[in-house]
Image (cartoon, rainbow, N blue to C red):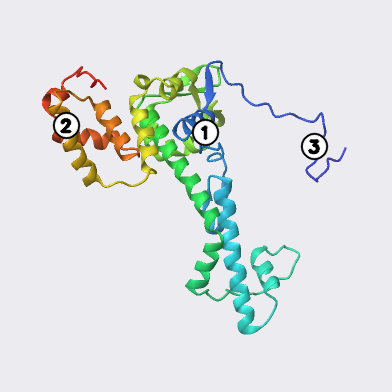
Amino acid sequence: MKLPTSGYNFPLGAKVEKAPVPVGYMELEKAVDGLGKGMFPTDWTGEERGYFKTGYLGQEFRSKIEYETDSAFRDAVLYAECELECDLSGGDPQWRYERRKAPVADDQPFMMVGDPPTLPTDKIKEIEERFASQITEAKKTRDRREKVEDVFLHQLLWAGLITAHYVAVDGKIVPIEKNIWGSDEGKRIFESGWLEIDKEGRLTSVRAVLIAESDLEDHVSPAPAAKPRLNAAIEEVKTSSAPRHSRAKVRTWYQLHVKRVLDEGGKSSRDDDLDAAREYFGISISRGFMRELRREFAPESWKSKGAPRRKS
């Protein structure tokens, strides 16, 4: 029987079976998605990763919104160039645009079109303004992905806080050495979510990268003590987009804050200081900056282990 060439698949045709995931594990993509939701609870869409597409000049894209926005913007620039060309020498801009966009088929005669004229900068800026909202969203998507991937790849996998695994040909669950995550190969494996293993000396087999559910829970659970390094990374991400504040003003405020608490005969812990600063300025002050201020201005009695929280 001749198989259809239209892409149709018979209802009971061959089925591609997906390799099973061992109980207690999840695929890397799902794990990164879980971290993304933890770092960006309201903004993470789940579409930041897992999309591989090559755009103009071989540029690679990892999310659909980035690829589609870049393609639409470049198409608009190309069409404007074709319009300018026709204004100078005549012709149909749509025809020139389509010839430059579409590759010539083998059975069609080759038609020399040439390069279009360069658009003035102000015209390109005008097109950019039309796509301003899409470009902004695409950049935000890319920024979220890069921050989450940096935490997962470098602060968790490469640092050895989480160990990735794969299922070998014999069914054994094999750990992946942490050192690989610091290499270019490790980055490629992390982006794709799978690795190739040697099978019987000559053939290779593709295996999904797996993360133990319990390992991930240790780093995205609500308990602060369970994930100190990850908490710091999330805190940094959340405060980086907060309203800007003058570090000088915070420093001045903190010196007055220390004097006031001492005059009242009290003590102030690190958390007390951070809560007071955020309440006063109405924005997120980073823990790292507050630690700097405490080292410089807080009395030694406030820095001892187990220093009690100030009573309200």
Residue at x 53% of width, y 23% of height: 26
Outermost residue, right direction?
1
Residue at x 13% of width, y 27% of height: 262
Amino acid at pointer 3: Asn
Viewer-nearest of discs 2 and 3: 2
- Locate residue 277: give its quadrant: top left
Of 177 and 246, the residue lying toward us:
246
- Locate residue 297: give its quadrant: top left
Seen in the picture, residue 122 relative to 23 is either above or below; the reply is below
Q: Position of residue 20 (x, y in %)?
A: 61, 21
Q: Is residue 181 left or right of residue 265?
A: right
Q: CA distance from mark 2 to mark 3?
A: 76 Å
Of 250 and 232, the residue lying toward us:
250
Seen in the picture, residue 96 relative to 157 is either above or below; the reply is below
Q: Residues within 10 Å of mark 2 (few under 14, many from 20)?
A: few
> What secondary structure is marked by label 2?
helix
Q: CA distance from mark 2 to mark 1?
A: 54 Å
> What secondary structure is marked by label 3?
loop
Q: Position of residue 54 (x, y in %)?
A: 56, 51
Q: Which residue is mark 2?
A: 260
Amino acid at pointer 1: Gly
Q: Which residue is mark 1?
A: 193
Q: Position of residue 237 (x, y in %)?
A: 38, 38
Q: Position of residue 36 (x, y in %)?
A: 48, 33
Seen in the picture, residue 74 relative to 218 is either above or below; the reply is below
Outermost residue, bottom direction?
89
> What secondary structure is marked by label 1?
loop
What number is the disc on residue 9? 3
Q: Residues within 10 Å of mark 1 (few under 14, many from 20)?
A: some
